[in-house]
Amino acid sequence: QVQLVESGGGLVQAGDSLRLLCVVSGRTYDQDAMGWFRQAPGKEREFVSAVSWSGESTTYAESVKGRFTISRNNALNAMYLQMNSLKPEDTAVYYCARRSAIAVSTQEKDYDYWGQGTQVTVSS
């Protein structure tokens, strides 16, 4: 059983920063890619960022490129999302996800395991 637990969300003002953490436990395959998604009220869940097992391959949604940075520490079974210059439109529940494959993916259907989410609220 693979479990993912997110933390680090909160209420911040526009322009502030937050760092999200996702910790993975349970049986996993080596070289799994991971990603972050988010879901705003009344909207579909959308891709934010993804990272390969090595950390060398990353991809971002256009809306967060240049402001968010994804990283991971495999020794700690952890993945991070550093979010800078936050905007009110970044308000959402943020989910981490893991897929049983090497390549990064922007598609929700490609991920096998999901966390419960952490709320990020950005006030203007």
Image: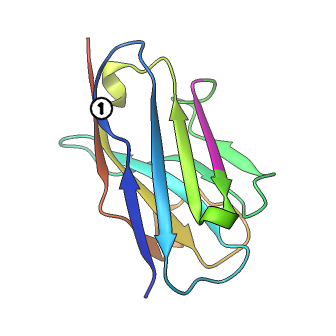
- Residue drawn where x is 57% and y is 73% of the image: 99
Q: Which residue is mark 1?
A: 91
**Relative side of 124 to 22, left or right:** left
| Residue nearer the viewer, 33 or 71 | 71
Q: Position of residue 14 (x, y in %)?
A: 35, 13
Could you tell me what secondary structure mostly forms the magenta stretch?
Answer: strand
Magenta segment includes 93: no
- Residue drawn where x is 59% and y is 83% of the image: 28
Q: Position of residue 21 (x, y in %)?
A: 47, 50
Q: Compared to 103, does 7 lie above or below?
A: above
Quarter that holds the C terminus: top left
Quadrant of residue 115 within the rendered picture: bottom left
Q: Compared to 54, does 44 lie above or below?
A: above
- Residue drawn where x is 68% and y is 65% of the image: 75
Q: In the image, which residues are magenta? A: 67-71
> Residue flagged by tag 1: what amino acid is it?
Thr
Quadrant of residue 122 within the rendered picture: top left
**Relative side of 75 to 119, left or right:** right
